[in-house]
Image (cartoon, rainbow, N blue to C red):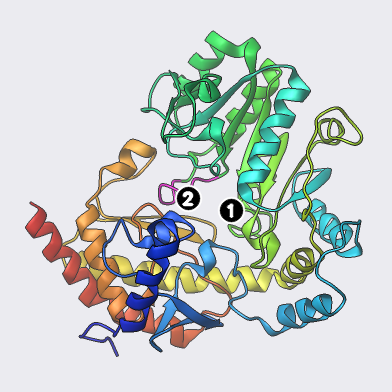
Amino acid sequence: MTRTTALPTTASAEFFDRARAVTPGGVNSPVRAFSAVGGTPRFIRSAAGAWLTDVDGNEYVDLICSWGPMLLGHAHPEVQAAVAEAVARGTSYGTPTVPEVELAEEIVARAPIEAVRFVSSGTEATMSAIRLARGFTGRDIIVKFAGCYHGHVDSLLAQAGSGLATHAVTSTPGVPEAFVAQTLVIGYNDPEALADVFATHGDRIAAVITEAAPGNMGVVPPRPGFNRLLAETCREHGALFISDEVMTGFRASRQGQWGLDGAVEGWRPDLVTFGKVMGGGFPAAAFGGRADVMAHLSPEGPVYQAGTLSGNPIATTAGLATLRLATDEVYDHITAAGDAIKAATAEALTAAGVPHRIQATGTMFSVFFRGGEVHDFDDANDQSLPAYAAFFHAMLDAGVYLPPSAYETWFLSSAHDDRAVQHVIDALPDAARAAAAAMTTES
């Protein structure tokens, strides 16, 4: 049944106070602080399957899944067993290991790449891919899209409006203007802006980088053929196309977003970045691509990249176990569970008179509190944030943990069974009414 009163958060509040005394904002990644929705972040004590348990003993159906990695749910017994066995052999060697070779083989078999290099975070993966693209092409300019996030890489922490190409402006203190001077930002899903930027700078562009299907402004799928256009335009001008699949890789589908468009349309990116699912819940990421491009990496080539914990045997063991268990049946189950929640969400919001738009790519989806399609960052910004905050807290009080931001993706796992899905569905009507009330107050 849907709860009608807020859950107790005394212990979470106490831990948050302690955390703020020793950690900036009390968190180690900004969105965890609930700044976008207000209130006290929940400190999670444990997780199993589709459920989180906080330090106050409250249980929540988890719809963030550690921001994507937990494709199989939390504490999957086979992944846990593989990790326990690996830990018993030691946690880090500083040498080549068997699990990293096996995981590399698994990724190459699924993804549109010929070689892969492991790193420890998605940020490190995109940073390394950018360096490699510049080293391979001998060019400096990088083109990115407004609203696409590629980690906290200095040269990619840039903001600009949609439309024609704009020289990037740093979006955070601490990043000198010179660091983003070679980054151009254009509107997402905008073929004319792409043509214009190449007409002006084509012979100096090293790469175009994009989220394969953006999930950091909510889910905003590429328009049909847009990613193919990026690949073809880059090839025509001698630039590289970097597809950032840190979020979508092995999550949107068995082959990531590329399995939904590139595999169907017959094109491949030059470089791809991975993270999240491929680490099975551990800090692991990777970048890979064409063999001739990857051959420019040290020690085979002149572009330097290194990492003490890259290819860590525990992380690669967890990732390998996860991918081997990620069968077609897993993706079918997550898709069906997501379809049920999307349909119920639309029904509840419609009944409450709340304008909304639900968008998805593969198993990933999000809800925008606005009418009409969302094609770019400007569209994503044109929604009611107070309505989302009210909706979020009503769901949280009912025992459903949504992303604490209107600009994030909802994730499910193969552990989301009928009980978990029904719990979410039961919470939706009250949350929709809370959103409607917030919109009335806002107007």
Q: Residue 355: in sight, yes or no?
A: no
Could you tell me residue 13's position as x and y percent? 32, 75
- The reply to whether the C-beta atoms of the residues labelled 1 and 2 are less than 8 Å apart is yes
Quarter-of-image position of residue 56: bottom left
Q: How far apart are labels 1 and 2 at the CA level?
A: 8 Å
Residue 214 within the magenta-colored segment of the rendering: yes
Q: Is residue 206 above or below residue 63?
A: above
Residue in the image at 24% along x and 53% along y: 385
Residue 48 within the magenta-colored segment of the rendering: no
Earlier-in-chain disc, 1 versus 2: 2
Q: Is residue 400 left or right of residue 393?
A: right
**Amino acid under disc 1:** Thr
- The label on residue 215 is 2
Quarter-of-image position of residue 317: bottom right
- Crowd band around label 2 with a 10 angstrom C-alpha radius: few (<14), some (14–19), many (20+): many
Which stretch appears magenta? 213-220
Q: Is residue 196 left or right of residue 313?
A: left
Residue in the image at 39% along x and 64% along y: 21
Q: Secondary structure at mark 2?
A: loop
Could you tell me residue 35's position as x and y percent? 31, 57
**Amino acid under disc 2:** Gly
Could you tell me residue 94's position as x and y percent? 87, 57
Name the chief secondary structure element in magenta.
loop
Residue in the image at 48% along x and 74% along y: 337
- The label on residue 248 is 1
- Crowd band around label 1 with a 10 angstrom C-alpha radius: few (<14), some (14–19), many (20+): many
